[in-house]
Image (cartoon, rainbow, N blue to C red):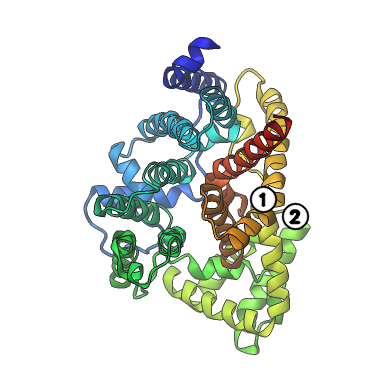
Amino acid sequence: MTFAINHPIKTLVIFGLLLRIFVVFFYSHINIFPDSGGYIELAKLLSESNLSGYHGQRSPGYPMLLVLANNQLFIAIVIQLLIGILTSVLVHKNFKLLNFSARTALLYTLFLNSFLHVIFYEISILTESLTLFFIMLICNLLLKRQNKNTYKKWLILSLLFAYLVLIKPFYIFLPFLVYGFSVFKNFDFRKIFGKDILILLFPLVAFTGWSYVNKVNTGYFVPTTFYGYNLAQNCVWFAEKSPEDYRMISDIYVRNREESVRDHKNVSMAIWESYDELKEKTGLSFADLSAELNNFSRATIKANPTDYLKQVFTSWLDFWKTDISWKSDFFRFGSATVFAFIWDLQHYVLRLFKVAFLLNIPFLCYIFIRKRKITPEIVFATFVIITSFLQAFATYGTNSRFSFPLEFLMVMVVALQIKRIHLTFKNRKN
C-alpha cells in the first residue's frame, strides 16, 4: 500500500491496464449499437472531406476520434481504453485538488475506475467514455485555476467546451453555467463583459457552425436532425391525444406503441418502430420528418401539459438509474454469469451514491443561499442537476446514458460531504 500511495499515477496505470486486459480477455468484442452506425458513417465522410448532402444525424466530435483511428474500430477501441486510463489519472488529480489525502484520493479513484460499465463503454462505439474524459478535463482546469481570471484560462476552457459540444451538442448549456457562476462570484456589473465571457466563444462557434453545415445540407439550422424524433419520444404515452391535424402520425405511433407493449419491447423506441411507415405515408426525408415530428410533439405537449410533465418526471427518474452496454452472447468461457453478478453488486453501490447525492442537494442549496458561497461541490452538483432536468425535458429512452459521464462528479460531491462530516466530528472531539 505504501508503494501505491507514493506512486499513485503508476498504480492507476498498472491497475487500469490489468483490469482492461482482464475484461477484454473474457469479452473480446467491439460493441456496436444502433447509435454506432451514425458515428461510423460520419467518420467516413469526414475522412473524405465531403459532407455534401449529409443528413445531419450526428455531430462530429466523436467521429473525429474514429477518423484519428483511420476508421479502424479496433484502433478506436484501443484509443478509448487508453483514454479511460488517462481519465483515471485526471480523477485522481481532481481529488487531490479538492484537498483529499493521498491515500483517500487514490482509494476513491480506484473505486470509481473499478466499475465494469466504465470499461464496457470504452469498448463500445459510443460517445460516453470520450464525454467523461472531457468533463473530467474541464473540472481539472476549473479546480486548478479556480482563483485565476486570465485570458488563457477562459480560452482553454472555451476550446474544451467547444469539443464537448461537438461530441454532444446537448452540453451547450454548460459553458453558460460556468460563466454564470464566475460572474456571480464577487459580483460586479463590469464582470458581465469581463474576461469570463470568452468561455462562450468557441462553444457557440462549434454549435452554430455545425448547425449551419446541417442547414446547408438539410435545410434546417439544428445541431442534429434527431431533435424531432427525440422530443416525440416524450409523447409516447399520450400520442393519441394529439390535435386532429396530426391524426395520421398519432395513429401510427400509438399502434407501434401498443405492439411494443405486447411484444415486451422498449416502449420509448416506438417512434423508431414507426419510422418506415411514417416515411412511406408522408414521403418526407429523415430531416423533414424530424421537423414534422417536432411540430407534432410541440402541439401534442401544448394540448397535454400535465401528461408531458408526468413523462418528464419518469424520464428524470430514469436518469438516476445505472446502465451497462454489453451483449451477453459475446462473453467467453461462460463468464457472463460472473460479470453479471459483479455488476449487480456494483450498480447497487453506485445507486447508493446517487441517492446520497440527491439527499445532499438540500444542504448544498442551504450553503449557497445562506452563505452565498460557491464551492466546487455546488458547481459540480449544479452540473448534474441541470443535466438531469434538461435531458428529461428533451427525450425519453436511454436517459441513464446521460447520467454516466456525470457519475464521477456525483461521487466527488458525496465524498466532499463525507469529508466535511468527518472533520466536523473530529473537531468536536478535540
| Residue type, numbered disc 1 | Trp
Residue at figure coordinates x 45%, y 42% from the top left: 136
| Residue type, numbered disc 2 | Asp
Instruction: Give the percent coordinates (x, y) of residue 405.
Output: 52, 45
Residue at figure coordinates x 63%, y 83% from the top left: 302
For disc 2, the neighbor class at 10 Å (few under 14, some 14 to 19, many from 20) is few
Q: Can residue 37 be seen from the camera position used here?
A: yes
Question: Which of the two residues, 63 or 5, is positioned nearer the viewer here?
Answer: 5
Which circle marks residue 320 in the picture?
A: 1
Question: Which of the two residues, 69 or 52, is positioned nearer the viewer here?
Answer: 69
Q: Is residue 42 left or right of residue 401?
A: left
| Vertical relation: 293 (above or below) 266 | below
| Residue holding disc 2 | 263
| Quarter the N terminus occupies | top right
Instruction: Give the percent coordinates (x, y) of residue 220.
Output: 37, 74
Instruction: Give the percent coordinates (x, y) of residue 189.
Output: 37, 72
| Quarter the C terminus occupies | top right
Q: Earlier in the sequence, mark 2 or mark 1?
A: 2
User: Quick one: SS at disc 1?
Assistant: loop
